[in-house]
Image (cartoon, grey):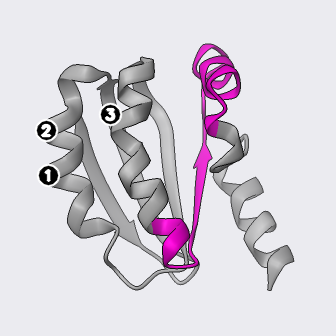
């Protein structure tokens, strides 16, 4: 799992590339830990480069989702493929994060909350 980021005025863009599964736990932990401490209210995770997601991979994100919620921030997933979206919905993960179709939709969502 490769993770790259870009800071914007709207929030922190996080680009994920590769498989989000049980084997990616260490990479996710190492790379996301410092990112989620940046002072940005909105964190946007781009799933367009994600090749596979497993329930274990989603569980790897839970500590960061909880941290974001405790800090009164919001995690928004976008460019989520249909199969991955199904797993997110069936696992109940969609109740913890906002899932939208594109970055444009995510930005409109954020702008509507201001």
Determine which residue is flagged by label 2. Answer: 26
State the quadrant of the N terminus.
top left
- Determine whether 55 is above or below 103 in the image: above
Determine which residue is flagged by label 1. Answer: 30
Count neighbours of disc 3 (C-alpha within 10 A) and say few if under 14, some if 14 to 19, many if 20 or more: some
Residue 99 visible in rendering: no
Residue 6 visible in rendering: yes
Tell me the mark number nearer the camera, choosing from 1 and 3.
1
Determine which residue is flagged by label 3. Answer: 17
In the image, 70 versus 97, the foreground residue is 70
- Determine whether 73 is above or below 27 in the image: below
Would you say the residues marked 1 and 2 are in contact, meaning their CB atoms lie under 8 Å apart?
Answer: yes
Residue 87: within the magenta?
yes
**Of pointers 3 and 2, the one earlier in the residue sequence:** 3
Residue 90: image location, x then y, percent:
68, 20
Magenta-highlighted residues:
68-93
Residue 71: image location, x then y, percent:
49, 79
């Amino acid at each position: 799992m490769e993770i790259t980021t870009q800071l914007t005025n709207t929030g922190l863009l996080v680009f994920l590339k590769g498989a989000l599964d049980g084997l990616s736990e260490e990479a996710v932990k190492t790379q996301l830990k410092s990112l989620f401490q940046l002072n940005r209210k909105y964190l946007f995770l781009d799933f367009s480069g994600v090749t596979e997601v497993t329930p274990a991979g989603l569980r790897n994100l839970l500590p960061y989702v909880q941290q974001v919620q405790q800090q009164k921030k919001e995690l928004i997933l976008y460019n989520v493929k249909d199969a991955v979206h199904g797993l997110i919905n069936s696992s109940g993960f969609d109740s913890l994060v906002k899932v939208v179709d594109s970055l444009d939709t995510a930005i409109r969502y954020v702008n509507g909350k201001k």
